[in-house]
Amino acid sequence: MNEPKTLIVYYSRSGNTKAVAKIIQSKVGGDLVQIETSDPRPTNYRKEVEQNVQEQNNNTLPKLKTSIKNFNSYKRIFIGTPTWNMALPQAVVTFLNSYDFSKKTVIPFNTNGGYGIGSTFDQIKKGAKGADVLHGYSVKGGEEIDGILLTIKDQKKVKVSKEVDSWLKRIRVK
């Protein structure tokens, strides 16, 4: 039996969500696409946090540079996101608003600074209208506030890879 065409999209600031996306791709195959905004984001962590909180409070959605022209051909879509202000980064909200998820399987994954998923998985479920949203995966990534950025490397990468194997088995995704 052929596996459904798979897309793995992710939004990543420090590289942790990207690292998990690459691990997932190594397990299930598929196309890997980074969600990027049209306008550059602040490189300073605190300025990025301020901008994101302001966007969330004003429900401002940044324009995306990322465009997936053959989106309709994908049947299985992994969506990777960090937790920002206990919610989705607004760029991920823009992504969700930009495509029709009807009759697709959506599989969320998350990295966070230790506070958990917040409302990210609920927002993905709400935003991916008409999709079958499976149980997500979450892992603690960096702690940017303390200057600890990419942590999913070396031994932690091995551990995350094993966790992803277990998660994919639990949700019956090959």
Image (tube, rainbow, N blue to C red):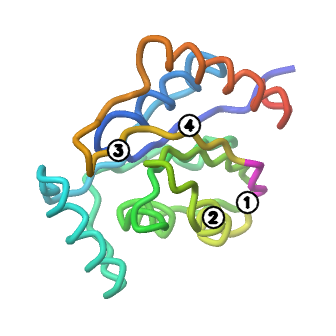
Name the foreground residue: 161 vs 173.
161
Is residue 172 shown left or right of residue 34? right
Report how far apart the C-alphas of labels 1 and 2 lie in the structure: 6 Å
Q: Label 3: how many residues lie within 10 Å, few (<14), some (14-19) or many (20+)?
A: some
- Total count of labels: 4
The residue where tag 4 is placed is 7
Report how far apart the C-alphas of labels 4 and 1 lie in the structure: 14 Å
Q: Earlier in the sequence, mark 3 or mark 2?
A: 2
Residue at (28, 36) in percent of width and height: 148
Q: Are marks 4 and 1 in contact (CB under 8 Å)?
A: no
Could you tell me the amino acid type at mark 3? Glu
Which contiguous range is marked in magenta?
A: 131-135
Q: Secondary structure at mark 2?
A: loop
Q: Earlier in the sequence, mark 4 or mark 2?
A: 4
The residue where tag 2 is placed is 128
Which part of the image, by quadrant, shows the N terminus?
top right
The residue where tag 3 is placed is 143
Viewer-side label of 4, 3: 3
Is residue 30 shown left or right of residue 46? right
